[in-house]
């Protein structure tokens, strides 16, 4: 049985298949990967968010939070 986080991850992956560069979904995906402690995936999602929305106010916050995560 999937956890709520796993279900949310499935949802955001499907949503991004339909709207690849949607900042709202990319933002949520970064947040979810940070919550799940998946650093490499969080970094990749953040890179995609930075490309899709370079003016996003949360980029530096996400950088800092990801930087605190172990490899």
Image (spheres, helix red, strand yellow):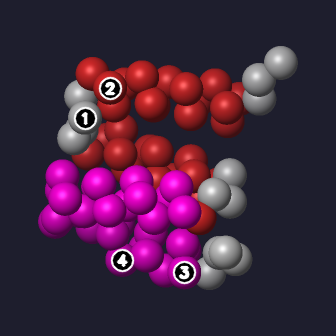
What residue sits 16% from the left and 66% below the top? 55
The kind of secondary structure element at disc 4 is helix
Sequence-first disc among 3 and 2? 2
Q: Residues within 10 Å of mark 2 (few under 14, many from 20)?
A: few
The C terminus sits in image quarter = bottom right
The N terminus sits in image quarter = top right
- Taking the magenta stretch, the answer to whether it contains residue 63 is yes
| Gap between marks 4 and 1 measured at Cα | 22 Å
Q: Is residue 16 left or right of residue 8?
A: left
| Gap between marks 2 and 4 measured at Cα | 26 Å
Sequence-first disc among 4 and 1? 1
Q: Is residue 43 left or right of residue 51?
A: right
Q: Magenta span covers which residues?
A: 40-67
Q: Are marks 4 and 1 in contact (CB under 8 Å)?
A: no
Sequence-first disc among 1 and 3? 1
Sequence-first disc among 4 and 3? 4
The kind of secondary structure element at disc 2 is helix
From the image, tell me which residue sits under label 2: 17
Mark number, residue 67: 3
From the image, tell me which residue sits under label 1: 20
Q: Could you say which quadrant of the image residue 54 lies in?
A: bottom left
Mark number, residue 60: 4
Nearest-to-viewer mark from 3 and 2 = 2
| Gap between marks 1 and 3 measured at Cα | 25 Å
Q: Are marks 2 and 1 in contact (CB under 8 Å)?
A: yes
What residue sits 77% from the left and 29% below the top? 3
What residue sits 59% from the left and 64% below the top? 39
Nearest-to-viewer mark from 2 and 4 = 2
| Gap between marks 2 and 1 measured at Cα | 6 Å
């Amino acid at each position: 049985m999937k956890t709520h986080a796993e279900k949310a991850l499935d949802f955001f992956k499907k949503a991004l298949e339909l709207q690849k560069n949607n900042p709202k979904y990319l933002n949520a995906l970064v947040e979810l990967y940070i919550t799940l402690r998946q650093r490499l995936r969080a970094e990749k999602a953040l890179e995609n968010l930075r490309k899709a929305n370079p003016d996003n106010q949360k980029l530096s916050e996400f950088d800092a939070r990801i930087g605190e995560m172990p490899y």
